[in-house]
């Protein structure tokens, strides 16, 4: 059974930092991409960052580029989202998800996974990030 478990969310002041983790278990396919999405109250879900297992390529949307960094551990069982210089508008529930769709994975460095959330097979339960003073 495939499971994705997010952790690391919490309450942080503007300008602060958090590191989110996405622990993946029960997934054995070699070709995939993992992405972080977020959804704020009353807003649509938004793709934030993605990473390809093929070549490690990454992409971040403009609103977080330079502040957020997606990475993975050497065992490729955990994906991280390092979030710095947090702003109140970053407040949302953050989800990680996996896609095995080849055309989506191929476009990771261009951000393709972030605009094709319907192609993701497995999702975590989400972790709340609140940025407030």
Image: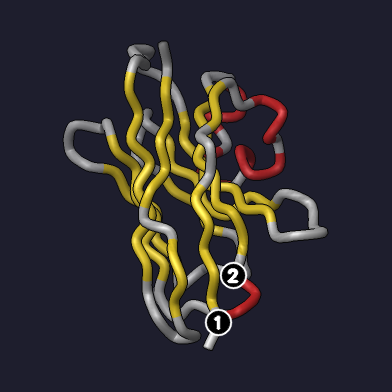
Crowdedness of circle 2 by 10 Å Cα count: few (<14), some, many (20+)? many
Residue at the image position 66 percent from the left and 25 percent from the top: 119
- In the displayed structure, does residue 35 sit left or right of residue 77? right
Where, quadrant-wise, is the N terminus in this rendering? Answer: top left
**Mark 1 and mark 2 residues within 8 Å of each other at the beta carbon:** no
On the image, numbered disc 1 is attached to which residue? 132
How far is disc 1 from disc 2 in space, using C-alphas? Answer: 10 Å
* Among the two numbered marks 1 and 2 on one chain, the one whose residue lies closer to the N terminus: 2
x, y percent for residue 60: 53, 58
x, y percent for residue 103: 61, 24
Q: Is residue 111 above or below residue 87?
A: above
x, y percent for residue 33: 47, 31
Secondary structure at numbered mark 1? loop
Looking at this view, is 4 or 75 the one in front?
Answer: 4
Residue at the image position 36 percent from the left and 62 percent from the top: 82
Secondary structure at numbered mark 2? helix
Count how many numbered circles sit on residues in the image: 2
Residue at the image position 50 percent from the left and 28 percent from the top: 98
Q: Nearer the viewer, mark 1 or mark 2?
A: 1
- In the displayed structure, does residue 115 sit left or right of residue 11? right
x, y percent for residue 110: 58, 47
- In the displayed structure, does residue 31 sit left or right of residue 64? left
- Which picture quadrant has residue 120? top right
Residue at the image position 72 percent from the left and 28 percent from the top: 118
Tell me, for residue 112, which label it has, or none: none
What colour scheme was applied to this rendering of the protein? secondary structure
Crowdedness of circle 1 by 10 Å Cα count: few (<14), some, many (20+)? some
- Which picture quadrant has residue 84? bottom left
On the image, numbered disc 2 is attached to which residue? 90
- Which picture quadrant has residue 68? bottom left
Residue furthest to the left: 74
């Amino acid at each position: 059974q495939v499971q994705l478990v997010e952790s690391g969310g919490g309450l942080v002041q503007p300008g602060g930092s958090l590191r989110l983790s996405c622990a993946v278990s029960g997934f054995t396919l070699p070709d995939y991409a993992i992405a972080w999405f977020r959804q704020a109250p009353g807003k649509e879900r938004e793709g934030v960052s993605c990473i390809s297992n093929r070549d490690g390529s990454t992409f971040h949307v403009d609103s977080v580029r330079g502040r957020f960094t997606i990475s993975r551990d050497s065992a490729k069982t955990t994906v991280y989202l390092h979030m710095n210089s947090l702003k109140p508008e970053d407040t949302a529930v953050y989800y990680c998800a996996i896609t095995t769709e080849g055309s989506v994975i191929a476009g990771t460095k261009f951000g393709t996974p972030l605009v094709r959330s319907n192609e993701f097979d497995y999702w975590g339960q989400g972790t709340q990030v609140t940025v407030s003073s």
